[in-house]
């Protein structure tokens, strides 16, 4: 006969906190928490003491004070009478401008180079390899300064365009001027009725979207394939062109013209913006090219062979079979490249482009002497931008992700 | 019927393939002109190549290597090359020592050179497993040796730092019989106390008895390529272990530790490196007790390390996620504890998977060392500005950029080649 004895009553000993796996993780966390809180308390108390010693306080009131400096590159109204907050806003918009332009161009370059690097054409593939290796292995800062030097040193000054036989001349039917102060291009002028043209344009975009859905649905139901590309192209151009001429050409172009020592009229792209934009795009484009190449190579040959066996033509194989699968591989690294480009735009400091760092973290910081507030605010804004980009791209990534069951 | 038949008794010699199916023509047909689109691409590529090379090659071939100023360079160009565009690499021959060593005193150039050569000796056992393992002892000493060689000063201060590790080890050995935990804690605390209090006095005393010192060099004399290498190598060496710890923390099932790691990683990855460098320069005086001041190079190294470690952590986390759960379960069923499992089973595989991205981060870190120019340290790019600020070389751009770019390119390209080699060597699966 067996008897069951009670298990020995467990008494809790202090050493169990460390040696017993049931309690150990709790102990470690409590120790970590105490350490963390202590560290922060120490840093904050140091900061308070140091601020008091310097006779400074911690408030963001300086943001509403008149800034007193000018910003040459701006997307919204701004003058030296505006507040520091407004200056920071202008800087933020400039950062976003170069980031958006850069991401767009970098994607184009990346896809182009990545696909060409896989082409059967030996010469092109080798040239693209050289491009990728050159841009990936040299610091982006060097590229930015080099592009800036190209734009400022290798282009003529505006006065070279003057006189009877000028040393330099404008290109594209006297509409675009490359100068060492930037590139001048014609700007659109909005006359009466131009709003209607814009509305027609937006409507035709909606029409293209609707037609795409319709064609897709029709193909699913009847199997007929419409020549979608040509119809979409027609929807894109025809209504806008008709509206444009019916309304008597309301949208015009204002050409840049030489007045005195400088060009006036038209749009000016400053060299700082151009250098930053081109350098960041070419640099990031090289990385994206590698991602694109890896994505396409990751799709096994069997997929494209199966598509040809089904009788799909090469471009349909690419569009319907290879690209949708390759995109899943390409998008996650693409997101981090976009993030890198956005963060690298803070290198604008090298060419004097007035981005967030140059306004809020530069002139405002130096003028007001509020390092702590400015830096914290700037880091917070960059953090929000980064989280927003990665968040929105993750949503997109989840929507194209392979749904596994 | 006559028995007339023909049976060939020997093979005919093989005929050469037709001219279009062999040699250069065949190669060009398959690789350059396989169809009309390909042919157009080839022609465009040839035109682009021609357009680029027709400008660059003459400029490069006419280059001038001996001159004292840019004006002299231009005079030589006009006399020799009839005023055709020519590169003036004389600026490199005249100023290369500044680009490489910065303002380091000229008679002490041997010290960075020696530490650079020794760097390869120290790296050899890490990079190649055919090198004798005993060299790892030198690898462990090397960081201290490098600091001493670059910054100079008394050797005793350095030996006192090393002695701190000895103190920790001795304390651990002495107390490990009493209690393992106490021994570990004391082993961490004892060296800190040693470094804070008696080590300085002992070092000074020893220095006054047996003075062994080399001329000391201040941080602000450092610059050029040297500072890039110092920051780059320190950042690389420190960010890998920190990154591993952060990755493990993020994968941990202790929620507080996990969220602390996530917060740190996401914060660092969310802000540009340049803001972190400015923080190191401007804000550290606020965060630390008044009067604390430490070297700007150390500040930069800390920030660059933290920055790279956050990226490293994400990369290694990717490697950890790629491991099948069976590996973790196998480690558990063998009865290994957490650290044993990580050390023997998980990490070797996770690190192997993430080698390309880890080296990618190393390359990025090395390239990012150029950013120190913005906080007042003149690395190579900073020196191109300084050289241009001199009237003798005012207006020279491309030659300097080409030199700087080439130096970075060689370093980064060899790193990526090494990683590809390592990846092939460690490949154990069969495709």
Image: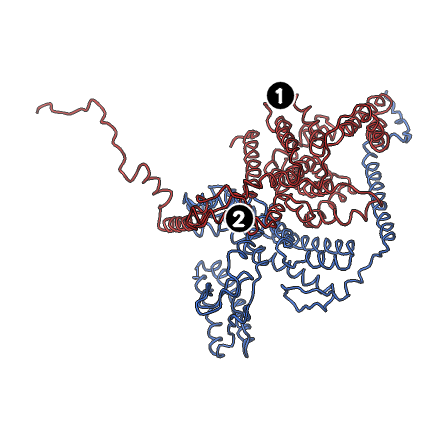
Chain colours: A blue, B red
Quadrant for the N terminus of chain B in the image: top left
Q: Which residue is mark 1?
A: B132
Q: Which residue is mark 2?
A: B70
The quadrant holding residue B254 is top right
First-in-chain label (2 vs 1)? 2
Asked if B425 appears above or below A398 in the picture, the reply is above
Q: Residues within 10 Å of mark 1 (few under 14, many from 20)?
A: few
Kindly state the secondary structure of the residue where label 2 is placed: helix
Q: Which residue is outermost to the left?
A: B1
Circles 2 and 1: CB distance less than 8 Å?
no
Kindly state the secondary structure of the residue where label 1 is placed: loop
The quadrant holding residue B310 is top right
Q: Residues within 10 Å of mark 2 (few under 14, many from 20)?
A: some
Foreground residue among B331 and A68? A68
Left or right position of B183 against B43 = right
Which chain does tag 1 point to? B
Q: Please determine if labels 2 and 1 lie on a single subunit.
A: yes
**Of the two numbered discs 2 and 1 in the rendering, the one whose residue sits closer to the viewer:** 2
Foreground residue among A240 and A313? A240
Relative image position of residue A218 (x, y in whole percent): 48, 61
Does residue A19 appear in this view?
Answer: no
Q: CA distance from mark 2 to mark 1?
A: 51 Å
Which chain does tag 2 point to? B
Does residue B157 appear in this view?
Answer: yes
Left or right position of A269 against A11 = left
- Mark number displayed over residue A207: none
Relative image position of residue A41 (x, y in whole percent): 85, 46
Foreground residue among B335 and A136? A136
Asked if A235 appears above or below A327 in the picture, the reply is below
Relative image position of residue B182 (x, y in whole percent): 86, 27
């Amino acid at each position: 006969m067996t008897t069951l004895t009670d298990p020995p009553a467990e008494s809790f000993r202090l050493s169990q906190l460390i040696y017993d796996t049931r309690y150990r993780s709790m102990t470690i966390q409590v120790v970590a928490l105490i350490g963390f809180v202590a560290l922060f308390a120490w840093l904050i108390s140091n900061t308070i003491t140091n601020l008091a010693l310097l006779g400074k306080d911690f408030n963001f009131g300086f943001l509403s004070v008149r800034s007193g400096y000018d910003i040459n590159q701006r997307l919204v109204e701004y003058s030296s009478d505006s507040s520091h907050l407004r200056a920071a806003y202008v800087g933020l918009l400039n950062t976003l401008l170069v980031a958006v332009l850069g991401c767009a161009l970098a994607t184009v370059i990346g896809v182009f180079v990545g696909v060409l690097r896989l082409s059967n054409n030996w010469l092109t593939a080798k040239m693209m390899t050289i491009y990728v290796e050159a841009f990936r292995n040299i610091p982006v800062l060097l590229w930015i300064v080099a592009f800036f030097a190209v734009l400022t040193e290798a282009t003529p000054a505006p006065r070279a365009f003057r006189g009877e036989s000028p040393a330099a001349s404008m290109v594209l039917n006297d509409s675009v001027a490359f100068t060492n102060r930037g590139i001048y291009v014609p700007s659109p002028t909005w006359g009466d009725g131009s709003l209607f043209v814009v509305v027609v344009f937006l409507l035709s975009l909606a029409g293209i979207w609707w037609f795409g859905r319709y064609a897709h649905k029709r193909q699913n139901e009847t199997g007929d394939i419409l020549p979608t590309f040509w119809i979409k192209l027609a929807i894109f151009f025809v209504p806008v062109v008709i509206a444009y001429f019916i309304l008597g050409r309301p949208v015009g172009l204002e050409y840049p013209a030489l007045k005195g020592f400088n060009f006036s009229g038209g749009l000016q792209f400053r060299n700082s913006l151009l250098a930053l934009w081109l350098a960041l795009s070419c640099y990031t484009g090289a990385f994206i090219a590698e991602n694109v190449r890896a994505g396409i190579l990751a799709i096994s040959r069997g997929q494209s062979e199966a598509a040809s066996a089904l009788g799909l033509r090469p471009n349909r194989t690419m569009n319907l079979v290879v690209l949708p699968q390759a995109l899943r591989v390409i998008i996650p690294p693409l997101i981090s490249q976009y993030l890198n480009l956005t963060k690298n735009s803070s290198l604008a400091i090298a060419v004097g482009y007035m981005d967030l760092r140059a306004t809020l973290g530069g002139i405002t910081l130096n003028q007001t002497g509020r390092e702590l507030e400015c830096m914290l605010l700037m880091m917070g804004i960059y953090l929000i931008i980064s989280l927003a980009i990665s968040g929105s791209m993750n949503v997109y990534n989840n929507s194209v992700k392979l749904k596994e069951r | 019927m006559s028995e007339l038949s023909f049976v060939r008794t020997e093979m005919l010699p093989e005929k050469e393939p037709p001219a279009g199916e062999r040699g250069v023509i065949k190669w060009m047909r398959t690789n350059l002109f396989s169809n009309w689109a390909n042919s157009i691409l080839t022609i465009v590529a040839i035109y682009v190549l021609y357009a680029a090379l027709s400008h660059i090659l003459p400029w490069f071939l006419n280059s001038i290597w001996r001159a004292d100023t840019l004006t002299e360079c231009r005079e030589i160009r006009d006399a020799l090359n009839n005023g055709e565009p020519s590169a003036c690499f004389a600026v490199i021959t005249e100023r290369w020592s500044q680009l490489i060593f910065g303002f380091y005193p000229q008679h002490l150039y041997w010290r960075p050179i020696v530490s650079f050569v020794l760097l390869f000796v120290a790296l050899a056992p890490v990079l190649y497993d055919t090198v004798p393992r005993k060299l790892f002892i030198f690898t462990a000493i090397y960081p201290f040796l490098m600091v001493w060689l670059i910054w100079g000063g008394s050797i005793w201060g350095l030996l006192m730092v090393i002695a701190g590790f000895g103190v920790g080890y001795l304390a651990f050995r002495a107390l490990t019989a009493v209690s393992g935990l106490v021994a570990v804690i004391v082993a961490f605390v004892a060296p800190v106390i040693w470094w804070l209090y008696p080590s300085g006095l002992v070092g000074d005393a020893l220095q006054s008895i047996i003075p062994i010192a080399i001329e000391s060099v201040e941080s602000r004399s450092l610059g050029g390529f040297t500072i890039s290498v110092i920051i780059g190598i320190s950042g690389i060496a420190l960010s890998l272990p920190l990154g591993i710890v952060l990755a493990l923390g993020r994968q941990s099932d202790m929620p507080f530790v996990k969220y602390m790691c996530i917060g740190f990683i996401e914060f660092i990855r969310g802000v540009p490196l340049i803001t972190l460098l400015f923080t190191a320069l401007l804000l550290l005086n606020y965060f630390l007790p008044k009067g604390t001041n430490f070297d700007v190079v150390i500040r930069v190294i800390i920030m660059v390390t933290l920055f790279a470690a956050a990226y490293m952590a994400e990369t290694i986390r990717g490697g950890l996620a790629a491991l099948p759960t069976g590996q973790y379960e196998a480690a558990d069923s063998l009865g290994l504890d957490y650290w044993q499992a990580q050390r023997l089973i998980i990490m070797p595989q996770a690190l192997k998977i993430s080698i390309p991205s880890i080296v990618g981060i190393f390359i990025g870190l090395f390239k990012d060392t150029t950013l120190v120019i913005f906080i007042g340290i003149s690395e190579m790019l900073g020196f191109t500005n300084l050289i241009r600020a001199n009237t003798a070389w005012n207006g020279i751009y491309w030659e300097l950029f080409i030199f700087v770019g080439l130096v970075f390119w060689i370093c980064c390209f060899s790193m990526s080649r090494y990683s590809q080699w390592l990846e092939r060597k460690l490949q154990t699966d069969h495709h």
